[in-house]
Image (spheres, rainbow, N blue to C red):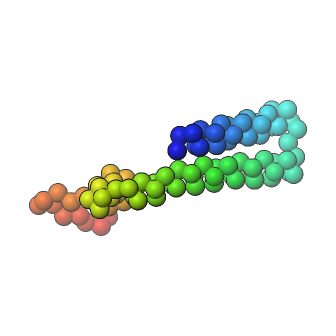
Amino acid sequence: MKDETVLLGENLIKLESELDGLFAAKAITQTSLKSSLNSIGAVQGDLRAAHLKYHLLTLDILTPEQVARYSELRGYTQSVQPGHTTHPH
């Protein structure tokens, strides 16, 4: 995961820096703004997809008990202590 996401993260930083440079140089236009944001959004989506892909792959190699614990640690389930109840807020 690290190899894939580091490259995407570096690309995202480069695109954000280029956008900042356009603003700093007062060279930004509606067209270049939209193009920059579309590029940034695409890389953000690719980065998120790469990250979540590895979460899915992790579930394929864990036992059911490990999946339950993984889900709990990720905050996907509520852990209830004996003698305690959960109340909706």
In the displayed structure, does residue 50 sit left or right of residue 79?
right
Seen from the viewer's position, the closer of residues 76 and 33 is 76
Q: Residue at x 82, y 37 (%)?
A: 22
Residue 35 lies, in percent from the top left, at 81, 51
Query: At x 58% / y 55%, what residue is drawn?
Result: 49
- Tell me the residue at 57%/39% (across/down): 3
Q: Residue 18: horizontal and vertical position, in percent?
A: 77, 37
Q: Is residue 80 visible?
A: yes
Q: How many marks?
A: 0
For the residue pair 5 and 76, the one nearer the viewer reads as 5
Q: Residue furthest bottom?
A: 88
Residue 74 point in image, percent of width and height: 37, 53
Left or right: where does residue 58 sit relative to residue 23?
left
Q: Residue at x 38, y 56 (%)?
A: 61
Residue 25 image offset from top left, x and y in percent: 85, 32
Taking depth in this image into account, of 26 and 50 the one nearest to the observer is 50
Any part of residue 75 in sight:
no
Image quadrant occupied by the C terminus: bottom left
Relative to 45, does residue 9 appear above or below in the rendering? above
Direction left: furthest residue: 83
